[in-house]
Image: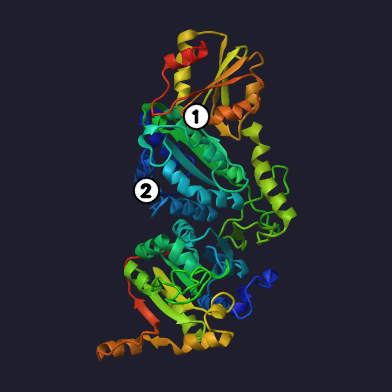
């Protein structure tokens, strides 16, 4: 059984979070993500959860990490300037293996840029924005339905992999209203239980993920952003230990890239292949619908980080990949790393989606 | 139990310099926590970055050693998500009043139920002795080589003005008074702020004519003006001595608080 609603993307995101058990939201108002916070402010207290408006995005990110250690399913939502402020604590969450969900409804940057207009300029910041080496997961919704479903998925991945997960939406998807089907229940994947008597940061399973020692359960765990040993104790000048720790933090995500790859493929034999995520997916779909050309393929990404590069290899006849993005080619560059054929970047800045004509022109070699 | 039972024995020795006052403050805090009869599994210590903030790493509870200045924001998440937990924050003058100043005033405003112990050594010790927002005028540090030209913060006045329910100041000399003040803070619903002035022989003392550790402790003792005496001087219309700082229980009230155990 499902029910049908006509919702804004940001509302669908908040409802997805509530459906999967989010019980803590710490946030700060920022266009174009504010509706997520507003919806949580209405709904969370009624469900026994906690909504708190923090003094800035640094504190928002800090609050959800603190809440997560008590076992809460915690999230925040922001846009570019707030995302920049969150970066240091995002690195802390990666280093301390704290599950949390950060929604970034992207707007035009740099700086204050275009608060009410759409963009995808934070895709590399999501991957590499905090200092040091680490790995995260980023999902990109292209519909209101996916705002719901990928938020659910983000919470499950965060708990499963003990990592910050980003829902990298954009203003287009965040603010559009469209039909959405709401399931009665959604899948919930929790954290790996902690095994008593083991050091809290020892990962013995092949997935390299330690069990989660929730605060308040008598585990006396020390959590620090310093390089730490398996006991969680600071050990910041041991080169081998630092290498092993950071390698594990990266490997636990990168090794699972196939398992968490989420994409659709159309016309696998095509020679010209569009690759898109988020808002631009919609324009590519229009072009695919209008042309019905078997020689035009489409790779629609929902997981962008870790990048599912095996999806590219499925297009064996590809002579060219065309990548429309609302940035100057951030993911096009990532795609070029994985293929030998040319990657044609179709950037669009300014806040509007590509038009179908622009993509057709690129396809026909006129742009 | 005694305060010693709260230490992680396998973490010793600690990193503090010989003569550092932080150990005194941690002992007093743990003695106060111990006297509350709290269980370790229901107590969480949170800190930011700096010498003071290494304290939770030595304490046998769940502990969260976070990013510079942000301890109170992390602690807010812990306490709001699980009000059953007792939350105690260790911080320092740089961590709390410089990079963390905004979180400090907002935690006071929210009057969120936690106790914050600030080890104020009036300098950045961990990074080797730079001036902080509480470095007194004319004092020397590696970034105030000609004497500090900026007026310092009064952290207790700040906490009071911003809304904390309990505010007290003592020093590393006043161990009994400090322990009592921390306990009073732990007992008070809402935000409790205890400033503890400490000697830092390595970074502050050697630059500022406290050649011996006890010279600085002696200074803290002799330059403390009891709150009762200050009040008396004010009543009599007499001037307050300029080179002294007020110690004692400075604020105790019952503003509406957040995160109090239900």
Q: Which residue is at a point 63% across and 75% down the rendered structure image?
A: B17
Looking at the image, can residue A188 be seen?
no
Q: Is residue A119 left or right of residue B214?
A: left
Residue B145 in the image: state x and y as whole percent: 50, 72
| Numbered circles on residues, count | 2
Q: Which residue lies most toward the right here?
A: A240
Residue B255 in the image: state x and y as whole percent: 31, 69
Q: Which residue is at a point 35% across and 43% down the rendered structure image?
A: A38
Q: Residues within 10 Å of mark 2 (few under 14, many from 20)?
A: few
Q: Chain of mark 2?
A: A
In depth, the one of A194 and B23 nearer the eye is B23
- Whether B226 is drawn above or below B91: the answer is below
Q: Which mark is residue A275?
A: none
Q: Point out the tag, 1 or 2, that comes first from the N-terminus.
A: 2
SS label for mark 2: helix
Residue A211 in the image: state x and y as whole percent: 65, 51
Q: Is residue B167 left or right of residue A166?
A: left
Quarter of the N terminus of chain A within the rendering: top left
Q: Quadrant of residue A257?
A: top right
In depth, the one of A88 and A223 nearer the eye is A88
- Whether A193 is drawn above or below A153: the answer is below
Label 1 vs label 2, nearer the camera? 1
The figure's colour scheme reads rainbow
Identify residue for label 2.
A46
Residue A275 in the image: state x and y as whole percent: 55, 22
Identify residue for label 1.
A328
- Whether A25 is drawn above or below A171: the answer is below
Q: Both on one chain, marks 1 and 2?
A: yes
Q: Chain of mark 1?
A: A
SS label for mark 1: loop
Q: Residues within 10 Å of mark 1 (few under 14, many from 20)?
A: some
Q: Quadrant of residue A279?
A: top left
């Amino acid at each position: 059984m499902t029910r049908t609603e006509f919702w804004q993307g940001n509302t669908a995101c908040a409802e997805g979070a509530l459906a999967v058990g989010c019980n803590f939201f710490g946030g700060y108002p920022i266009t174009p993500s504010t509706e997520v916070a507003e919806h949580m402010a209405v709904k969370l207290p009624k469900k026994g959860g906690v909504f708190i408006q923090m003094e800035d995005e640094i504190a928002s990110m800090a609050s959800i990490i603190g809440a997560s250690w008590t076992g809460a399913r915690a999230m925040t939502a922001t846009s570019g300037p707030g995302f920049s402020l969150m970066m240091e604590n995002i690195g802390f969450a990666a280093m301390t293996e704290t599950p949390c969900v950060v929604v970034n409804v992207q707007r035009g940057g740099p700086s204050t840029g275009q608060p009410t207009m759409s963009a995808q300029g934070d895709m590399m910041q999501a991957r590499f924005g905090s200092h040091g080496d680490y790995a995260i997961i980023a999902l990109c919704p292209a519909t209101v339905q996916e705002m719901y479903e990928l938020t659910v998925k983000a919470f499950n991945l965060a708990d499963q992999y003990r990592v910050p997960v980003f829902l990298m939406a954009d203003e287009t998807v965040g603010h559009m209203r469209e039909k959405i089907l709401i399931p009665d229940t959604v899948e919930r994947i929790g954290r790996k239980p902690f095994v008593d008597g083991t050091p809290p940061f020892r990962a013995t399973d092949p997935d390299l993920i330690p069990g989660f020692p929730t605060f308040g359960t008598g585990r006396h765990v020390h959590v620090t952003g310093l390089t730490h040993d398996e006991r969680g104790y600071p050990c910041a000048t041991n080169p081998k230990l630092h290498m092993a720790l950071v390698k594990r933090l990266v490997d636990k995500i990168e090794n699972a890239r196939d398992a968490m790859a989420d994409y659709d493929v159309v016309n696998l034999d095509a020679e010209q292949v569009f690759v898109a995520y988020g808002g631009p997916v919609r324009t590519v779909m229009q072009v695919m619908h209008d042309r019905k050309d078997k020689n035009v393929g489409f790779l629609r990404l929902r997981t962008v980080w870790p990048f599912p590069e095996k999806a590219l290899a499925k297009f064996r006849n590809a002579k060219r990949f065309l990548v429309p993005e609302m940035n100057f080619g951030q993911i096009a560059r990532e795609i070029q790393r994985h293929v030998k054929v040319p990657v044609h970047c179709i950037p669009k800045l300014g806040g509007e989606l590509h038009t179908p004509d622009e993509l057709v022109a690129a396809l026909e070699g006129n742009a | 139990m005694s305060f010693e039972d709260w230490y992680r024995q396998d973490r010793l020795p600690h990193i503090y310099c010989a003569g550092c006052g932080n150990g005194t403050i941690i002992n007093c805090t743990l003695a106060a926590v111990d006297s509350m009869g709290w269980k370790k599994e229901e107590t969480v210590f949170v800190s930011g970055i700096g010498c003071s903030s290494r304290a939770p790493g030595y304490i046998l509870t769940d502990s969260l050693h976070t990013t510079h200045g942000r301890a109170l924001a992390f602690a807010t998440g812990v306490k709001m998500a699980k009000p059953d937990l007792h939350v105690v924050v260790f911080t320092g003058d740089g961590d709390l009043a410089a990079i963390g100043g905004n979180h400090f005033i907002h935690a006071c405003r929210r009057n969120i139920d936690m106790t914050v112990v600030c080890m104020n050594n009036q300098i950045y010790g961990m990074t080797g002795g730079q001036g902080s927002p509480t470095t007194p005028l004319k004092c020397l540090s590696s970034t105030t080589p000609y004497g500090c030209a900026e007026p310092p913060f009064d952290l207790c006045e700040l906490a009071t003005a911003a809304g904390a329910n309990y505010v007290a100041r003592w020093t590393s000399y006043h161990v009994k008074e400090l322990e009592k003040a921390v306990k009073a803070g732990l007992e008070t619903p809402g935000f409790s702020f205890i400033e503890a002035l400490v000697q830092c022989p390595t970074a502050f003392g050697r630059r500022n004519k406290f050649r011996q550790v006890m010279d600085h402790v002696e200074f803290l003792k002799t330059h403390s003006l009891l709150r009762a005496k200050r009040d008396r001087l004010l009543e009599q219309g007499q001037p307050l001595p300029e080179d002294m700082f007020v110690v004692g229980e400075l604020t105790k009230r019952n503003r509406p608080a957040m995160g109090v155990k239900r």
